[in-house]
Amino acid sequence: MGHPARRACRPLRAGRSAGRRPGGRRHPPWRSDRGAGRLTSQGTAEPRVRLGNLPRTPRSARAGDSGFFGPGSLGWRIDREVVVLAGATAAFLLQLADPAVAAGVAQHSNFREDPYGRLRRTLISTFSVAFGSTNRAEGVIEHLNAIHRSVSGTVPESGAHYQARDPMLLLWVHATLVDTALRIYDRYVEPVTEGEMDAYLRESLPVAVRLGVPESLFPGTVAELRVWMAERIAGGTVRVTPTARSLSESVLYPSRFPPRFVWTAAHLISFSVLPPEILRAYGIRWGKRRARAMSRVATVTRNVLPLVPGPLRYVPAWRAARRRLATGAPAHG
């Protein structure tokens, strides 16, 4: 029979039925239409988030500064897991499914030309807010707000005007990050109670407000958040446009870094938590057989993770934050 994880990956190996992309690269078998073209870039290079652009925190101020979250928070417990990073694809696809978000990325970034550079900068920002000192986190948020203030345009498919500082757009992006992290953690790390989910959401409120989401719009529970997200999808406010489909190709079918086995595994984990209608809209084949295989992978992952050494299991930013605090907190605390 073989190991569950290996069995789950077998359907993804390129076989005779898998088409080839230009240049001889094979299309992953989960793709249902292997001939979609790309839109040309309409925008300018995006401002880059570099560590050097952010305000430096004096060493004396950094020591003992737990930032926005800190030891004992649900944020640190969940966001430190490397496996949660595999949900980045899911969050990204959900974000692009808002036509205004897709238009903004297409028109105001170099994502098509440098998708993994964009991912790297996004991770720097995300981990600086999650695990950095208060000064560093506030610096990142200020930097992001400055970028968003200059982002506006027209959605090509509808002609609607958009602004990146639109509170509903900001809430949608925030919701995708919260929802995806919770789904991945609950499925692949350990079960999360409803109360813990709501606590994780509440912990993220100060960050969301600083980024421009009015507190009055913020859902009180994760259940409310998910109902709102589902209603936006069902009502057509969130829908996969040709722009979103084109942008998704750079991540779903990368031509180089990272190695294929890495992005294949990450994508499968992400696909397992996405709504079926979103998967279909992006042309991703996801049947019962693959869903059952990933359920077995999730079981194996939950059992194996406690045995994985910390340097492999947890993101470097969390380990650096613990060193900064020098609290001596237990690795699983």
Image (cartoon, helix red, strand yellow):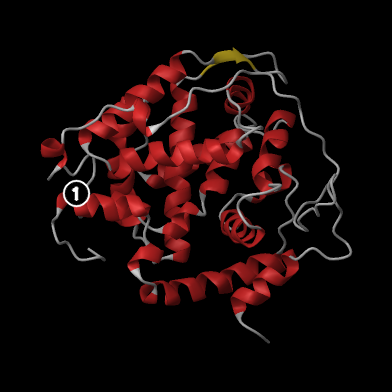
Q: Quadrant location of the N terminus?
A: bottom right
On screen, residue 26 versus residue 261, left or right, reads: right
Query: Which residue is the site of mark 1?
Result: 324
Q: Position of residue 230 (x, y in %)?
A: 55, 41
Nearer to the camera, 229 or 106: 106
Q: Position of residue 78 (x, y in %)?
A: 35, 55
Q: Position of residue 328 (x, y in %)?
A: 14, 61
Residue that appears at 40% across and 17% down: 146
Whether residue 286 is visible to the viewer of this picture, yes or no, is yes
Above or below, 313 against 128 in this view is below
Callout 1 amino acid: Arg
The outermost residue toward the right is: 16
Nearer to the camera, 275 or 118: 118
Label 1 crowd bin: few (<14), some (14–19), many (20+), radius 10 Å? some
Whether residue 214 is visible to the viewer of this picture, yes or no, is no
The outermost residue toward the bottom is: 1
Q: Quadrant location of the C terminus?
A: bottom left
On screen, residue 49 versus residue 271, left or right, reads: left
The mark total stands at: 1
Residue that appears at 57% across and 59% down: 269
Q: Position of residue 25 (x, y in %)?
A: 80, 52
- Which secondary structure lies at badge 1? helix
The image quarter in which residue 234 lies: top right
Nearer to the camera, 304 or 115: 115
